[in-house]
Image (cartoon, rainbow, N blue to C red):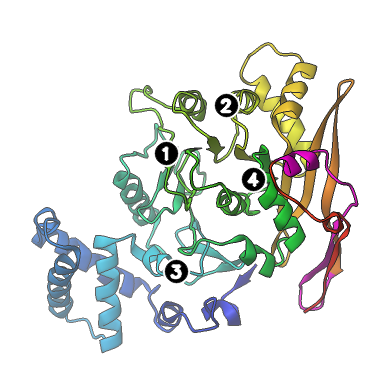
Amino acid sequence: MATMPADFNANGNGQEAGWVTRLANRDHTGAEYQELKFTIHRKLLDRINLEALSSLAGERARGEIRIAVAKLVDEERTPLSLVEKESVIEEVLDEVFGLGPLEPLLRDPTISDILVTTPKLVYIERGGKLFRTPVEFKDNTHLLRIIEKVVARVGRRVDESSPLVDARLPDGSRVNAAIPPVAVDGPLLSIRRFGKELLQGEDLVKKLALTEGMLELLKACVRARLNILISGGTGAGKTTLLNVLSGYIPENERIITIEDAAELRLRQTHVARMETRPANIEGTGAIKIRDLVVNALRMRPDRIIVGEVRSEEALDMLQAMNTGHDGSLTTIHSNTPRDAVGRLEVLVGMANANMGVRSIRAQVTSAIDLMVQVARFSDGSRKITYVTELVGLEGEQVTMQDIFLFEKSGVAENGRVLGRFKATGVRPRFYEKLRSSGIQLPAALFQTVVEIGPS
């Protein structure tokens, strides 16, 4: 992790991100500057009817407020340069119309995560690596006010009785907040952002996340309606891969998506999206993923895509896959395909279905055809590390065979992870199902090795 490295100012195209330069070149963290900004903000709230202004078009309302803020700055008679005055005006506008100090970060498309650890410690993730930013909040009260603004926009609440909250910003970004008493040192805020441009499979090949042969196999498996489970850790790229693979579902099929927070962005037309709902203030009215999976079965789906299984809904998902809803996709948190099977067993057990271990494993192996493991490496890259077929049961043991692997061999001087994508030589048992679906894959595909060098 680094603090303001040389490349922090560069966006994905190597051009300078102007907001970083502005933040670094002014003493916006000074107590006098902060007090001036909040004094103007308080006076603005006293003088302006923001509710009346909200009926105006966004740009017009912002223009009216800008004029009022400029007058208030002049009234303070604090010696400011033109650049400093403009900075104060912009920051007050961000407080009124946006998320305060976070607005410059939200405007930067190259940032994938914004992580507020304390009011004075704000980090971002860019290119798979964490960097500390010069962004700061005034204090815990200021940070809490921004969190309350976020959750209020989506009809949620956060207080001592409900100190944890998940929400979604208008641009689709996912927000998680934790406040005292569960957050020991003050409010915590995490924002997971998603790029505006949807990645294609070819983009993942260029990023060395997988090989062309691996992509061809995965594409064929989706089109042949195999059930696929994507496994990986936090930030490994599970949702990105799920988005890419879902793009190979034919346009003429009806797709039902089920998520905790709607992140999937499918390209098809006939997509019905559902999202869970938390309990209300009285603690009732919650709608869980399990409820939505059961409901989806009544909606005439061709495919069911569950953003992530993390609880008892795993049983319903497996049963759906086993009862004619093939071609379904979902993700799970796990480190290896073998671990993913074990985690599924635990999640199914949470459904209190009184199923024995062998029955659960039989459900898993008959429902899931293919497991795809993704991982994030030390250089920030994401790669598919296993493409594994679930074969069946031998006694009570789940049998599986790896079709593709990524073997890490070291790290180059520039920090780049070295290794190779390797086909194991095993031709999967579902190969005949691919052929019966009219999909022909060359035998050589299962013999390929692709090296990743230092440059």
Q: Earlier in the sequence, mark 1 or mark 2?
A: 1
Quarter of the image where the N terminus is located: bottom right
Res 222 label: 4
Q: CA distance from mark 1 to mark 2?
A: 19 Å
Q: CA distance from mark 4 to mark 2?
A: 22 Å
Q: Residue reaching furthest bottom? A: 81
Camera sees residue 311: yes
Q: CA distance from mark 2 to mark 3?
A: 40 Å
Res 135 label: 3
- Amino acid marked by disc 1: Ala
- Tag 2–tag 3 contact (CB < 8 Å): no
- Tag 4–tag 1 contact (CB < 8 Å): no
Q: Earlier in the sequence, mark 4 or mark 1?
A: 4
Residue for point 63% across, 46% down: 223
Q: Earlier in the sequence, mark 1 or mark 3?
A: 3
Residue 317 lies, in percent from the top left, at: 60, 28
- Amino acid marked by disc 2: Glu
Q: Earlier in the sequence, mark 4 or mark 3?
A: 3
Q: Which residues are magenta?
A: 411-436
Task: Identify the residue under disc 1.
Answer: 272
- Amino acid marked by disc 4: Val
Mark 1, secondary structure of its residue: strand
Q: Decide whether residue 44 is among the magenta residues.
A: no
- Tag 4–tag 2 contact (CB < 8 Å): no
Q: Earlier in the sequence, mark 2 or mark 3?
A: 3
Res 313 label: 2
Q: Is residue 47 left or right of residue 242?
A: left
Q: Nearer the viewer, mark 2 or mark 3?
A: 2
Q: Nearer the viewer, mark 1 or mark 3?
A: 1
